[in-house]
Image (tube, rainbow, N blue to C red):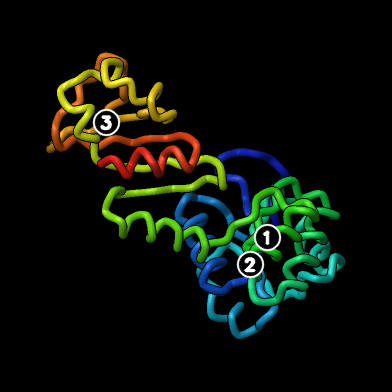
């Protein structure tokens, strides 16, 4: 059912749990050209999405033998979208790891759930509601027009150039030295984003893409 393990950009992916999160991930992967093995324990859900993905299977993924029978060990990447049933989430992640799946991404619904998934070996734990909530909160403040937090210690934001930098080059403004952030790129009004260089001039109304420690990025954006 699956291709051999590989790490190619279009490698097949297992997505387990076809709730809103899992379905959105599976659809995006399919649009990117991946073969998707979509799994859910509910037959009615499997029937609903039968024509949407490469393979759609009804299975109890808490049973490692059931995972083996559907060929899970042939995949190198899996996404576990089970959220409401924490025990099922944990057992599914453990089963995939036991079968040798190299990368297991898993959704968590709470901090404790996330901590458990990390301890049992999940490659990446996602808390979509929490992460989106933080993003919206930052955007609502008006100092950022986009914000992504990669983990608790690193973030990237899009924000207006602070007034103190206007009329200067980035080197003259000394933003990195003073604020501990890196200016990745800059966008002038009506123009496109370009890579930021020491000689890049900052004009009123310019937008900056800034990266660095989360607290420092937030403090810098508050200057705008």
| Residue hosting label 3 | 186
**Residue shown at the point (78%, 57%) measured from the top left:** 96
| Residue hosting label 2 | 110
**Residue shown at the point (44%, 38%) measured from the top left:** 216
Percent position of residue 157, x then y? 37, 42
Where disc 2 sits, the SS reads loop
Where disc 1 sits, the SS reads helix
Percent position of residue 74, x then y? 76, 51
| 3D distance between C-alphas at marks 1 and 2 | 6 Å
- Considering only order in the chain, which callout, 3 or 1, is on the residue closer to the N terminus? 1
Assess whether mark 2 and mark 1 are in contact (beta carbons under 8 angstroms): yes
Along the viewing direction, whichever of 60 and 1 lies nearer the viewer: 60
**Residue shown at the point (82%, 61%) measured from the top left:** 95
| Residue hosting label 1 | 114
Quarter placement of the N terminus: bottom right
| 3D distance between C-alphas at marks 3 and 2 | 36 Å
**Residue shown at the point (84%, 70%) measured from the top left:** 63
| 3D distance between C-alphas at marks 1 and 3 | 35 Å
Along the viewing direction, whichever of 163 and 98 lies nearer the viewer: 163
| Snapshot quadrant of residue 195 | top left
Residue 14 shows in this picture? no
């Amino acid at each position: 059912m699956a291709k051999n393990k590989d790490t190619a950009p279009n490698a097949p992916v297992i997505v387990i749990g076809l709730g809103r999160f899992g379905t959105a991930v599976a659809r995006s992967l399919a649009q990117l050209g991946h073969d998707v093995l979509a799994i859910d324990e509910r037959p009615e859900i499997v029937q609903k999405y039968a024509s949407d993905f490469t393979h759609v299977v009804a299975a109890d993924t808490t049973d490692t033998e059931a995972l083996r029978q559907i060929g899970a060990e042939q995949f190198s990447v899996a996404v576990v979208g089970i959220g409401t049933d924490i025990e099922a989430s944990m057992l599914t992640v453990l089963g995939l790891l036991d079968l040798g799946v190299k990368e297991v991404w898993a959704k968590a619904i709470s901090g404790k759930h996330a901590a458990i998934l990390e301890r049992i070996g999940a490659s990446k734990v996602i808390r979509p509601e929490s992460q989106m909530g933080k993003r919206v909160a930052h955007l609502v403040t008006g100092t950022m027009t986009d914000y992504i937090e990669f983990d608790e210690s690193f973030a990237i934001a899009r924000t207006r150039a602070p007034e103190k930098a206007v009329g200067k080059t980035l080197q003259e403004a000394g933003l990195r030295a003073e604020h501990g952030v890196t200016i990745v790129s800059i966008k002038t009004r009506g123009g496109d984003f370009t890579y930021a260089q020491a000689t890049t001039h900052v004009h009123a109304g310019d937008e900056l893409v800034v990266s660095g420690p989360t607290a420092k990025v937030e403090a810098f954006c508050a200057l705008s």
